[in-house]
Image (cartoon, helix red, strand yellow):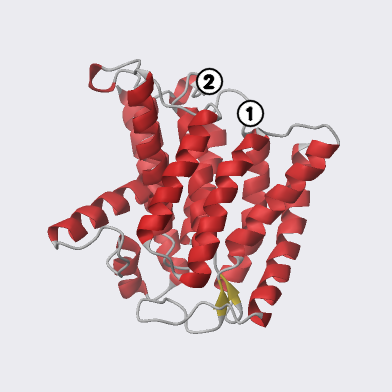
Amino acid sequence: MDFRLAISALSLSFLMILIFQNFFLKKSIIDDIKNRSSHKTIATRSGGLAIFSTIFLISIFNYFIGVTIFDYSFLIPIGLLVLVGLYDDIYNVDFKLKFIFQIIAAKIFIDNGLLIDNLHGVFGIFELNRITAQALTIFIIVAIVNSINFIDGIDGLALSIVTLFILMFEFFSATTSPLTNLSYIITASLLPLFYFNFKKESKVFLGDSGSLFIGGIVSIYVIFILSQDYIIKEQYDVHKLIFVISILFYPIIDMIRIVFKRILERKSPFVADKNHIHHLIFSKTKSHISTTLIIVFINLLVIFLIQTVNLLI
């Protein structure tokens, strides 16, 4: 089942990317080249819609043949994030509207059973009451969604970080999780987008629909990690919060840095600029591939160092 899911997702994703790219080009819905743009050729922001459509079609097919490959209720809040992001890709909506819909999507996640109700001893806190747990979960989901959105600034970076995150989630898991099939589908669906991201011409970007979508996916995984159901392999066992920070190191660090920087400069934390860490690295390398590889390597190094320290303690 896993292999067939991956092949189906890979093939369908490639087809969906081509279909939506052609549709966006025919409708002249292209990513305008601006001062902070990293591309100099025609590109569409249709990647996120294509990836979501791939997952949605695979889910619908399996649903009608009576096979549950993951919790299909996730598609409702994820779909909401995709629609909000797509609207922003086309009409450039105010960040406040996106923020409100992110909170609504987070509440739907909670109502579907995703809730951080235990801090596992952080600050001496274990179980949380319902209201505190819901507020914390909404904050975490919104923070993760925006952290992924923030790093979607150069070719392949957000795709690479999310792929690395999912691979690490599965590698460190002691058991097969309810998200394993979703991991196969997501990873396989993202692979064709690497090709379209790095093309010299006729590029396809994730767009806000894609970054909000994969940000929502990552938040599902993070909440699952922090639950009692996710068990880290004994030889790699670290505190779950440290584990999450290690495999999401770059998005977390970049978001903390850029938010504090903008606040200190009395700017809105959500106003886009070219002061992210990846922009600074890119200004030196002048290469999207090199910049992405450097950041992925740093994230892998952090994971390795944390595991090494854990083994030595």
**In the image: residue 91, left or right of residue 281:** right
Q: Tell me if residue 31 comes above or below residue 180 in the rendering.
A: below
Question: Does residue 152 appear to the left or right of 312 in the view shown?
Answer: right
Q: Find residue 278 and name its label.
A: none
Image quarter of residue 269: bottom left
**Residue at the spot of label 2:** 229
- Give 98 or 5, whichever is nearer the viewer: 98
Which residue is depicted at the point 30% across and 18% down? Answer: 121
- Amino acid type assigned to the residue bearing label 1 in the image: Pro
Residue density around tag 1, few if under 14, some if 14–19, many if 20 or more, within 10 Å: some
Q: Quadrant of the C terminus?
A: top left
Count how many numbered circles sit on residues in the image.
2
Question: Could you say which quadrant of the image residue 185 lies in?
Answer: top right
Outermost residue, right side? 65
Q: CA distance from mark 2 to mark 1?
A: 9 Å
How many neighbours does mark 2 have within 10 angstroms: few (below 14), some (14-19), or many (20 or more)?
A: few
**Residue 149 location (% of width, % of height):** 42, 57
Image position, residue 158 (x, y; %): 47, 57
Mark 1 lies on residue: 178
* Residue 248 appears in the rendering: no
Measured along the vertical axis of the image, is residue 134 above or below residue 95? above
SS at circle 1? loop
Query: Where residue 86 sits: x, y (%)?
Result: 55, 63
Q: Vertical placement of 161 versus 89: above or below?
A: above
User: Looking at the image, do the residues carrying marks 2 and 1 touch, with CB atoms under 8 Å apart?
Assistant: yes
Figure quadrant of the N terminus: top right
The residue nearer to you, when weighing 13 against 101, is 101
